[in-house]
Amino acid sequence: MTRNTAMSNINLAGENKVVGLGKGGSSIPVMKRKAQEGKEGAGLAKRAAFGDLTNARAGEGPSKGGKEGKETTMKKLSGMIKNTKGSLALRGKESKQTLVKKNTVVEAIKKSQEKEVKKTQKEISPSSSSSSEEGLMCVFSDNETSSEEKVVDRVARQPSRLTPPEGVEDFDLENMEDPQQHSEYVMETFKYYKDREAAFRVADYIEAQLEITDTMRSILVDWLVEVQESFELNHETLYTAVKMTDIYLSKKQVKKEDLQLVGATACLIACKVDERIPPMVDDFLYVCDDAYSRDQLMRMERKMLSVVGFDLSYSLTYRFLRRYGRVCRISMPVLTLARYILELSLMEYKLNVEVSESEVAAAALILALKMKNIEGWEATLKFYSGLDLAKVEPTLQLLLAMLQRPHKENLKTVRSKYSHKVFHEVAATIVPTSVTLTAEG
């Protein structure tokens, strides 16, 4: 069943519900219950919105209506008021000293709170978030501060943004008005991605697998690229699926006949994370040529999530590459070439285990810039990536050797994809014999 068929079935089901409602047979349980309650409670007396607010008990109250009942009620109320006033006067004399003591204690507490808050505000580091600072600005004091002073205080306490050194353009400052760039905290975002790399680093697992080889893994990734093209999925979905597959293979033994099931399940889960309208289960069974049943796919999904965990926000090389491409202001053909190199690297086992995603992305971009003979990007990439580019050299050489190898017929999906005019035919770019970083880089 395709997604179009499923959506048409959903639309037909919706139309049937509307027709059913027109006939008077409502399919909504809530509406039935309300209608039934309306019939049963038709003869009941109406109740006030907040209930019965009178003090009269059942069976009490004036025995006579009219003026006599009203006079009796007023006499009772006047007597209650006199008694209440007398008791309050006695209580006031007795508790006057107690209230003075309480006020003194409250004032002492307020002053101590003011001192603690002011002390905490002085100790706030520049990297603290604005939300936490605004919370600490709430001082329990009777002295009210004007709105202008509050605004000035908040602006003065905003964390200072990391500015680039001389000679590097401030890309984030120029795009501060663009909400899509989230320039105010983009540096912190990618620092967070870099900090998470170690938590999801894949160990070298291929030797521990009894039936799976690195060649079989490459064929699986090539097939996943084909699935991504067929379903028109986001590139983040593809990279998440490959990462999840590697994490699962590093923790569980997999038979060769179940390897495609693992890849399809990883792609299904990744679609639920990254796609607005993910493909249906039947779509994945179809691309697997019905080699597996629906029950097998569902059981593998539960098993995979229990093994890899439910934290699927991986640090993807694709996200790092897009960020590096923006700050270096490279053209779309150059960025597409870097994406081609990066997508080819997904099939390379050594470039997906025990590596840093940010370094692989930087190496792919550097190789693309070198292949296009573009210069003047070293200082910008070094600042925004936070990497020592000299340490990227080994990864750069691995990517170059990957491009220099002869094409394999069973691994041609990525090359065919990037040979199209939509991708600027970057797969036909001449590969250099050697590439080295400059002394500045």
Image (spheres, grey):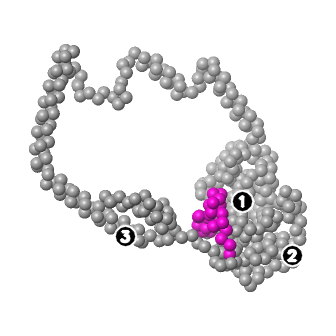
Q: In the shown orientation, is residue 325 left or right of residue 196? A: right
Q: What amino acid type should be assigned to the residue bearing mark 2?
A: Pro
In this rendered view, identify the residue nearer to me: 19 or 383.
383
Q: Say left or right for 25 vs 238.
A: left
State the SS at label 2.
loop
Q: Foreground mark, 3 or 2? A: 3
Q: Secondary structure at mark 1?
A: helix
Name the one closer to the observer, 110 or 146.
146
Structural crowding at the residue carrying mark 1, measured as other residues with C-alpha within 10 Å and reported as few (<14), some (14–19) or many (≥20): many
Residue 138 is left or right of residue 78, and the answer is: right
Q: What is the distance, in whole Å, between disc 2 and disc 1 at their CAs?
A: 27 Å
Q: CA distance from mark 1 to mark 3?
A: 47 Å
Report the magenta residues as a range. Answer: 168-197
- Which residue is rendered at x = 29% and y = 64% of the image? 111
Badge 2: few (under 14), some or many (20 or more) residues near its Cα, within 10 Å?
Answer: few
The answer to whether mark 2 and mark 1 are in CB contact below 8 A is no
Tell me what residue is drawn at x 72 percent, y 37 percent: 7
* Placement of the C terminus among the 4 image quadrants: bottom right
On screen, residue 198 above or below 41: below
Give the residue displayed 18% in from the left and 53% down from the top.
99
Question: Where's residue 336, x and y in %?
Answer: 80, 63
Amino acid at pointer 1: Tyr
For marks 3 and 2, the one nearer the N-term is 3
Which numbered marker is on residue 432?
2
Return the residue found at the far bottom. 439
- The residue beneath circle 1 is 239
Three-letter code, disc 3:
Lys
Which residue is found at the position 36% from the left and 24% from the top? 47
Q: Residues within 10 Å of mark 3 (few under 14, many from 20)?
A: few
Query: Looking at the image, can residue 340 be seen?
Result: no
Residue 425 visible in the snapshot: yes
The residue to which callout 3 is attached is 119
